[in-house]
Amino acid sequence: MNVPPRLADAAAWAAKAAARRGIRALSDDKAPFGIRLRRFAGPSSYRSKISHLRIAHLTDLHVGRITPFAVQQAAVAMTNAEAPDLVVLTGDFVCHSQLYLEQLVEVVGGFRAPTIAVLGNHDYWSGADEVERALRRAGAEVLKNRHTVLTLGRNHERLQVLGLDDAYTGHARRDEAVKGLRRDIPTLGLSHIAEEADGLWRHGVPLVLAGHTHGGQVTLARLHELTLGKIGGHRYVHGLYGSRRATGHASVDSVGNRLSKGTGTGLAATPEGAVYVGAGIGAAVMPLRIGERGKREVTIFELGAEPGSFEEHHGEQEPMPGRKPSQAKMAKRAAAVVRKRLSRERHKLRTMGPTKS
């Protein structure tokens, strides 16, 4: 079995594995476009069910005019160099339009491992059906409020992956996603919006991967925590939050009712799982990225490794206070999706011209 003992030296082992494949390891300051490779262990609860699976997480590719195409290509190459067993992508594949769907197909089709995706708000604004078709053409499986079981790795280990549809635009349906969820198989959750993790933990999903925030992009003087946390209302801004040693199922009874005492805000008094918010690859407004935490990133999760068994980029953090979007705001977001869809349809009719009788 070609796995480092107990994964205690996972980073060094990965570098040696890359060298055997003829791939030169790059230091952070030499990494293309400043893309950071960050590595973390999975939850403790996975250890009894997984010997080792390597998961690559990328988010917010934003293929389009704001981010040079070479950036996404470099991220794919960096991911492939790590030889992951699975690639997961957590939304926002496009940037305001459908003009770059062929490039999206090329990017996602470049991953050498099985690929699973969930959609984000930009995908709904630009046309979720078209983005989904492009992802499927590229060979990715798109999870919309459902889960699937994969057999991965040399040891043919099973992993259950749950994908929520985009919560920002009101398409997440947690009850649908967890229906029939198996408890005898370790589960990995995917959501574009990280705050959905609080609800998934209660159903025994100990690790949720997310995106959306871009890590703030500008992280000097903790500016990202001010803009996204205090002003934007996000509990999770960038990186690892919660606890990877939480059991998850302990707070749910036999029919799924929550047993743990809450805080009065609908959230657990203590974290029942962990969530990771990726800084993303692309951008939707400006490509500027300043500060280490705001750098573009590819994140590797060594499932089966015990937290603390090797050096990680950072430890588990305390969440921001957070603020749930109001019903009025959610209605406004849903209306924006409809408005943009109608605008695309009107534009299509205009470009087609009058039909002949």
Image: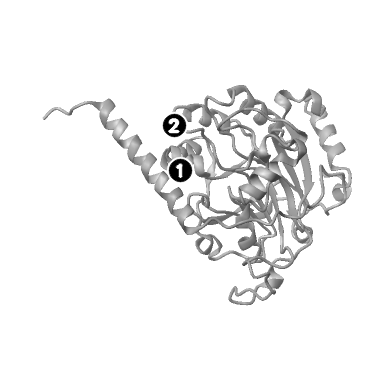
Give the CA separation, mark 1 to mark 2: 11 Å
Determine whether, in the image, residue 233 is placed left or right of residue 340. right
Q: Nearer the viewer, residue 76 or 16?
A: 76
Is 294 above or below relative to 250?
A: above
Q: Residue furthest left?
A: 357
Q: Would you say residue 77 is visible in this rendering? A: yes
Specify the label residue 98 is tagged with. 2
Q: Residue at x 52, y 64 (%)?
A: 175
What amino acid is at disc 1?
Tyr
Residue 147: x %, y % from top left: 56, 56
Q: Residue at x 77, y 59 (%)?
A: 243
Q: Would you say residue 25 is visible in this rendering? A: no
For numbered disc 2, what is the local secondary structure? loop
Is 222 above or below relative to 48?
A: above
What amino acid is at disc 2?
Gln
Color theme of the render:
one colour
Q: Which corner quadrant of the image does residue 19 belong to?
A: top right
Q: Is the C terminus in the top left, top right, bottom left or bottom right quadrant? A: top left
- Sort mark 1 into few (<14), some (14-19) or many (20+) by Cα contacts within 10 Å: many
For numbered disc 1, what is the local secondary structure? helix
According to the picture, the residue beneath numbered tag 1 turns out to be: 124
Q: Residue at x 83, y 33 (%)?
A: 15
Q: Nearer the viewer, residue 173 or 267?
A: 267
Q: So how many labels did they put on this image?
A: 2
Is 248 above or below relative to 188?
A: below
Q: Nearer the viewer, residue 94 or 218?
A: 218
Q: Residue at x 81, y 52 (%)?
A: 305
Determine whether, in the image, residue 127 is placed left or right of residue 288. left
- Sort mark 2 into few (<14), some (14-19) or many (20+) by Cα contacts within 10 Å: some
Residue 137: x %, y % from top left: 48, 36
